[in-house]
Amino acid sequence: MNGRNYISLTLLQPGVSEHRSKSQGNETIGTWFSSNGAPVRSNSYLLDGAPMQSYGGSNTASMSGGTLGIEGIREYRVITSGFGAEYGMTMGSQMMIVSKGGTNSFHGSVFEYLRNDNLDARNFFDLKTERTPGRLPEFKRNNFGASLGGPIKKDQAFFHMVYEGFRERLGVTKISDTIPISARPDLSRVAPVVRPLLDLYPAPNLPGDRYTFPFSQPTREDYGQARADYTLSDQDSAFIRYTTTSAERVEPHDFQEYTTARASRGQWTTLAENHVFSPQPAEYLSFLIQSHQDLHHRPIRSHRSPVFASAWTSHGCDQCWRIHGLRIGRAEFESAEYLQLE
């Protein structure tokens, strides 16, 4: 799993093919795939029975391009065909994920993974210049985190918490056309108002009047999840889970003076109560409250999510929930999407 992105495990399923020929943008990040020829947006992702797609509706990736949280997963299943009536809304595949809960014994983990460019091959366009003398651009990625779970009250109340961090410095090779030396006029003959514009174009440092520069593209993501379980009786149990992720990436343009900062933030909350009527499979009612917040090009612009949520606005919020003056979110409810009876 490259970058501990567990969504890549789906590509091992028969009939699943990855979609690579997509344009770069906020809505096309992450792993895109088709299940048995269905559209790439026709895949459902359920965490504890709750939808967890990003605002584009195609996958669960953050702005880092991956999906963290494998330390908080107990079960993971993908159905690519012939799924039952309890699943719906998409015709491609159904991905069911069950979060990890605590037990009567304390358990946890601590991890750190490092990947760098020491054994990487050189890209065809990684050309050596005075500004880029190295064999290839620098690359460094760190995946780290910890988890802890255990009892709050033996045989009755339990907890489980997860934190995962992602830090990456990716050397990006940018090659751009610039103004040739022979075409640069004598600045004394140029109008003063135009001179600052000409200075924005650097002198070529590659053959063919091209220009390259080193750029270390920084990406960071912080993921957290907390779950609490409570056993009311032999027939009734309940849990509440909160999941959040925040990511940011700074990307270069054709010239080093210009960059774009892209950011994303997601929050999901699930509250469920399970009642066992018989030793047969349990029947339960899940109340789902979800909000998803997406930030794009800086300065931050807010967009409304088409998937079960509303995004914040940068200057205010309509119909926000408030507790003692604290703005905590806005949700839009539809009975078929937020109240599920299984």
Image (cartoon, helix red, strand yellow):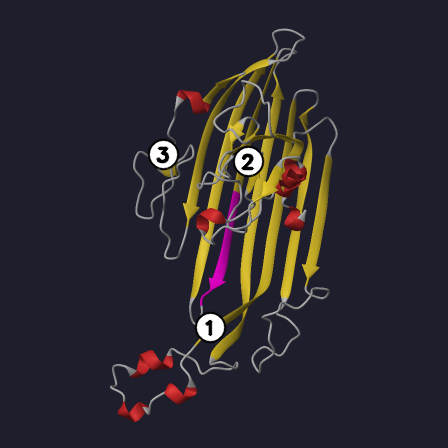
Give the main secondary structure, helix, strand or loop, of the magenta stretch. strand
Q: Look at discs 2 and 3 and give the one toward the viewer.
A: 2
Residue at image position (70%, 57%) is 114
Is the residue under label 1 in contact with that under label 3 (CB below 8 Å)?
no
The amino acid type of the residue labelled 3 equals: Arg
Which segment did they paint magenta? 245-253
The amino acid type of the residue labelled 2 equals: Gly
Q: Disc number at residue 254? A: none
Determine whether 175 is above or below 248 in the image. below
Return the residue at label 1: 176
The answer to which of 201 and 4 lies nearer the viewer is 201
Q: Look at discs 1 and 2 and give the one toward the viewer.
A: 2
Say whether residue 305 is left or right of residue 155. Answer: left
Report x, y in % for residue 30. 54, 47
Return the residue at label 3: 322
Residue at image position (37%, 81%) is 199
The amino acid type of the residue labelled 1 equals: Ser
